[in-house]
């Protein structure tokens, strides 16, 4: 069984759907709501196969009423259910953010801990395929800025399944973001690293623990989501240039594994932060500040950020490519900081 | 409709309790804020939205409630919370920011949450409406015959959440009763300046559900209409939209100069104070004599005093407790 | 109603142009994506929502438009943009991501903005509705008799923005015509699974404005209803809500397997292709002979080809131009 | 005139209303929309006196339909008007953020610069008076994270008027945030520093230039909004302890005057960032990273942040007071970093 499990490779998309499937199978309080989660199986396949197994009462297609149905997930969660609710693209948060950040994320606190709100909010993030400025953002820095929700971003199939199961079992609201470019969808170019062996049985990956995706000694590259794979690609190039890069996959922004960042920086003494989200007032600043707070004397050179500049993500392929963090930009940044 | 006497008495008692609670909160709110009103000072700092005059919308549903029914209310929540039977001591303690409060002092007057009875409210207009829909969905999943009541102001009826929530509940035929408390004002903005049609109950047709207008601020009228709507929901026949014309006797929040409503309006409103009118009616109809009403008042006032004493005797949370309860 | 012949011809020509544009975009969209469909590849990467079949909703208003009238459209915008007369060369160039495009390649197919004619669209459901209200407000301030048209899908009619926008326009009696393109599906979700009542036009009563259903996907029916609503708005008599039953002949976006609509549905739909039906009718009524129609087709196809050639011959923006135009 | 002007003291609230008044008086394309902006004069007085002068056609009370009327402001702006639109409390952004960040902030970019969207979005921010977690936030870090809008936060009357006039004349969307505790409202305790001489005539304060609110040599305190006054109070205490603090009032987060931060840090070599917004993924990280990027070798000690911890702002007075940045916390942080 164990051998069979580790031999089986899944895409991240299938791993997500499998995680949901297995929890729904054992826990009748889990259900799914969202646009096109039923017969379509989720625009990005996150609910593929669920309708056939669990039927339309537990896999509920909704109107385009995000405030209504995400708020309904909150109400259902307060009343004993464990909803998984999908915001099709994170870019749409603006039509329903009140329910997310002012309600879902705060009720537990306002109630002094008396009321739990175990919602999993799934949402697709990321660009790279010319879907322009209202369908290509990651925005995780913004979600992480607002207290009361966990923010999880798997980068590959093993973590995707385990983090999904952890998220469903978590008594807190969890925003679960999957990067379109890491899902292994047939219709989108994918980084092949995201597809990997996934055990058949249910398992948890703890939320709040970063993962060293690659060990290294000269420079730490901290990142999350699809950029983990770009960083790993960059690390290979860097190795050929004689630079040993350690790649840290944060896996969640809330809770943030600050100690993992600090430990790695203490080891390598140099830091690059790669973020597909907008550069300013976001993740790059938070990670660099974490390193400065926790490893100031260790830093041999100012940390460097590789992020999406503060512009709406442009449509035209060349513009977008120039905008999003690329393997080349990571290589250049890491090589630069390693030699300074 | 023949209303059981105990329901009439219960509604009267509850109205008295609500009014007394609001009056006493008002007194204590201003206690240390005057002569120069400072919103941050006193026993109860912060905004305070009181519901004196709106008791009928709250007590009318009370006799029809069953354990486990969910209610979501608004920034003006006390009357509804009291009518549902939320623990008055803990509620008062929350309003006074104490450790013994419903939310250990973290939520305050706009964020009262109770598990049993099943109550919640919020400071954001329309925010509770989808939550009620979700509660009703949970009841369906769990196979109970509980229902959810969603209270909101007439001002809230122009917020997108109104539309999305009612459509969802109607589409899924969920056991929700949407209750619009129409006090004719959203802060200073009169309904005619916010709402393209006179009665929100007419908007029910946009969702294919019953819409009923209660045009008097009268607990008996509310009792009847809410009873029918709640039964309907409990039977599984889906949601209703009820609009109740009511009066906010005081300012939008305490400290509001209320200059946007003219004296004539306010005078007429005070003349039809629903507590006075209902008391009179109960006396006229021989249901509760003046003496009986006095006895009720004393008993209810004592309950309110006890709650306030409990609250005032309770400790404040430790400052660093601010860090607790972000996550479970 | 007697419709001037030139309007009928104009509508036909425009339908032909739209259909050809969508067909050619479709071809070029798939050009470098197959056999293994890759959304990020090819001359036109990204999502592509085409409006073949929905031409009547766009062309029916065209003869009633005046210079300066504002239109806000959706993620499926080409038919409306073409009907309003947005520069086809620049529009094509934008879709191909070129420097000469309406937005210099920054916006793309869901974000087409034009000053003259006054057109905009968006990738977010319902987002354009309040914008149309604001355009109408600006027209009132400026004392022009321009009007605003707000297009949205039947799926969008359950988004909060629908409710807030129509209430505002009705309240302020603004010159807006809200046009619901009811193609019966929001991606895979059929209208019956999203909307508590059959016809969104009936929701007009929630705002005290006229609501009219156009139950055929026919430019003449649209022409008549839109003409009346647009006149009404232009006269200063306020907004209307029009729902037009139409057909999305292809998938939600290109690459959509469209498995949620069964073959029978699709077959029936294709049988009633509005371009074929309208052409037939014009021939039958002696308005445009088959030869004349062929001539029109050739002329319109040539215009489309010219636009595509312009686009394909245009340079891409410099990569670092991504930094420009965040601020004016 | 000039003498009279500089003698006249105004509260920040009156300065804001005066700025709007004067621009409306000369520019018929300016109008105001929002809840209770008419007869009430704005819940925080930002539109006081305007209805009487300009009438209900230009000072428009709205329904509680933020998506509707903020979106309408966008539409009006595109069509030649210069709307000032009020979101009563910034905490309500969640019901209308799509119109703000996905529409207002992006149309200029999407249109390749062809369409201008000159909206001023005014909104009240800040806590300190027990208004609990849905009415006490500042959230400016979040607005600053999302590209396409300027984000302005005056701390006192002179700047408030000048920045308002600049915002109205700006061809870009400007989010203009006023801190309730700095407005000089009769019904809220105020820091008296915010009330100051204000010229009668219209004038601009450029958006994007920080202001040295107090010169110092030992430590730089960078902040914004009401905390500027707390920092100035702290600086007095620090002076008595022999520590000379320089206080930098950013005045806007977008554009961010990074050079002013760097210059001051180069001078004092020590940095404290004070922020009433949530600590993580926000302003403190951005400012510290800016200093690290621009003045790495100058920094003698790790910068320190004094911010609101990542908890929804609690209601009870003692909890809230402990949560928000205080003069005492600033003194302690600055003294600590200055002696390290
Ligand atoms: C989304 C949102 N917008 C605005 C406000 C500010 N606000 C609080 S109460 C209120 C008026 C509410 O009017 P109504 O719904 O009629 O309730 P009432 O106060 O009359 O009970 C407003 C505008 C808010 N809390 N939330
Ligand atoms: C707020 C928001 N929610 C969801 C989506 C994703 N989405 C894009 S188009 C679409 C369906 C729209 O249906 P409809 O309004 O009927 O227009 P149609 O596609 O049929 O033309 C959905 C759900 C979105 N773009 N914006
Ligand atoms: Mg009201
Ligand atoms: Mg549709």
Image (tube, coloured by chain):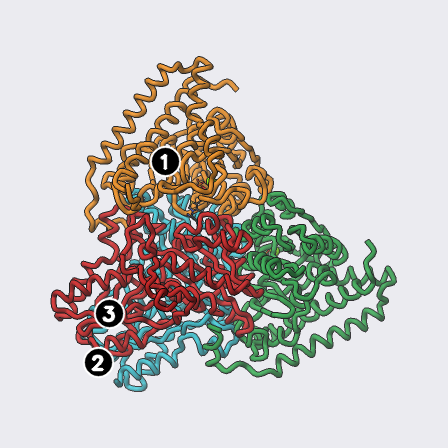
Chain colours: A red, B green, C orange, D cyan
Extreme residue toward the right, this view: B286
Q: Is residue D285 visible?
A: yes
In front of the other: C87 or B313: C87
Q: Residue at x 41, y 72 (%)?
A: D310
User: Where residue D25 sits in the image (x, y, percent)?
Assistant: 41, 48
Asked if labels 1 and 2 touch by Cβ distance under 8 angstroms, the answer is: no
Q: Chain of mark 3?
A: A
Q: For the residues marked 2 and 1, what is the alpha-carbon distance in whole angstroms?
A: 58 Å
- Given the image, what chain letter belongs to the residue carrying mark 2? A
List the residue tagged with mark 3: A214
In the shown orientation, is residue D100 left or right of residue C167? Answer: left
Residue annotated with mark 2 = A297
In which chain is the residue bearing label 1?
A: C
The residue pinned by badge 1 equals C78
Where disc 2 sits, the SS reads helix
State the SS at label 3.
strand
x then y, percent, for residue D24 = 41, 49
């Amino acid at each position: 069984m164990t051998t069979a499990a580790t031999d089986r490779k899944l895409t991240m998309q299938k791993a997500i759907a499998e995680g949901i499937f297995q929890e729904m199978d054992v826990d009748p309080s889990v259900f799914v709501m969202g646009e096109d989660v039923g017969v379509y199986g989720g625009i990005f396949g996150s609910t593929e196969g669920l309708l056939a197994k669990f039927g339309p009462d537990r896999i509920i297609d909704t109107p385009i009423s995000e405030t209504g149905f995400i708020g309904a997930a909150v109400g259902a969660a307060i009343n004993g259910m464990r909803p998984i609710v999908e915001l099709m693209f994170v870019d749409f948060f603006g039509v329903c953010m009140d329910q997310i950040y002012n309600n879902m994320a705060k009720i537990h606190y306002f109630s002094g801990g008396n009321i739990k709100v175990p919602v999993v909010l799934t949402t697709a993030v990321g660009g790279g395929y010319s879907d322009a400025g209202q369908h290509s953002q990651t925005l995780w820095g913004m979600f992480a800025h607002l207290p009361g929700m966990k923010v999880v971003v798997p980068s590959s199939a093993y973590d995707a399944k385990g983090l999904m199961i952890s998220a469903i079992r978590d008594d807190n609201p969890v925003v679960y973001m999957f990067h379109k470019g890491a899902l292994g969808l047939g219709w989108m170019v994918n980084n092949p690293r995201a597809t990997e062996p996934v055990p058949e049985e249910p398992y948890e990956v703890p939320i709040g623990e970063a993962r060293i995706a690659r060990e290294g000694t000269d420079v730490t590259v901290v990142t999350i989501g699809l950029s983990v794979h770009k960083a790993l690609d960059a690390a290979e190039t860097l190795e050929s240039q004689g630079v040993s890069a350690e790649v840290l996959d944060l896996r969640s922004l809330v809770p943030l594994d600050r100690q993992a960042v600090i430990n790695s920086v203490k080891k390598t003494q140099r830091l690059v932060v790669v973020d597909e989200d907008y550069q300013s007032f976001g993740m790059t600043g938070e990670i660099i500040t974490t390193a400065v707070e926790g490893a100031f004397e260790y830093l041999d050179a100012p940390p460097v950020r590789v992020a999406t500049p503060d512009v709406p993500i442009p449509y035209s392929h060349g513009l977008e490519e120039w905008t999003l963090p690329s393997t080349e930009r990571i290589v250049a940044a890491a090589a630069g900081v390693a030699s300074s | 409709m023949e209303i059981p006497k105990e329901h009439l008495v219960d509604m009267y008692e509850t109205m008295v309790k609500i009014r007394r609670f609001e009056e006493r909160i008002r007194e204590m709110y201003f206690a240390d804020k005057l002569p120069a009103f400072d919103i941050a000072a006193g026993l109860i700092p912060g905004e305070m939205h009181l519901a004196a005059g709106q008791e009928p919308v709250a007590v009318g549903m009370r006799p029809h409630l069953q354990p486990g029914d969910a209610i979501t209310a608004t920034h003006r929540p006390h009357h509804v919370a009291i009518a549902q039977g939320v623990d008055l001591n803990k509620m008062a303690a929350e309003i006074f920011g104490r450790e013994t409060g419903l939310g250990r002092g973290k939520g305050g007057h706009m964020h009262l949450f109770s598990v049993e009875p099943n109550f919640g409210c919020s400071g954001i207009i329309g925010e509770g409406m989808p939550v009620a829909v979700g509660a009703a969905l949970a009841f369906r999943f769990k196979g109970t015959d509980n229902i959810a009541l969603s209270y909101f102001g007439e001002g809230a009826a122009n917020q997108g959440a109104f539309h999305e929530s009612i459509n969802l509940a109607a589409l899924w035929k969920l056991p929700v009763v949407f209750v619009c408390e129409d006090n004719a004002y959203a802060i200073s903005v009169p309904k005619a300046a916010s709402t393209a049609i006179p009665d929100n109950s007419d908007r029910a047709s946009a969702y294919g559900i019953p819409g009923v207008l209660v045009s008097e601020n009268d607990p008996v009228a509310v009792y009847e209409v809410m009873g029918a709507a709640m039964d309907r929901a409990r039977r599984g026949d889906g949601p209703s939209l009820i609009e109740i014309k009511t009066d906010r006797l005081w300012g939008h929040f305490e400290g509001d100069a209320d200059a946007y409503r003219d004296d004539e309006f306010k005078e007429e409103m005070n003349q039809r104070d629903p507590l006075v009118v209902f008391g009179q009616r109960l006396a006229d109809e021989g249901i509760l004599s003046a003496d009986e009403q006095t006895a009720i008042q004393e008993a209810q006032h004592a309950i309110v005093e006890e709650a306030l004493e409990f609250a005032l005797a309770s400790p404040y949370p430790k400052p660093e407790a601010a860090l607790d309860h972000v996550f479970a």
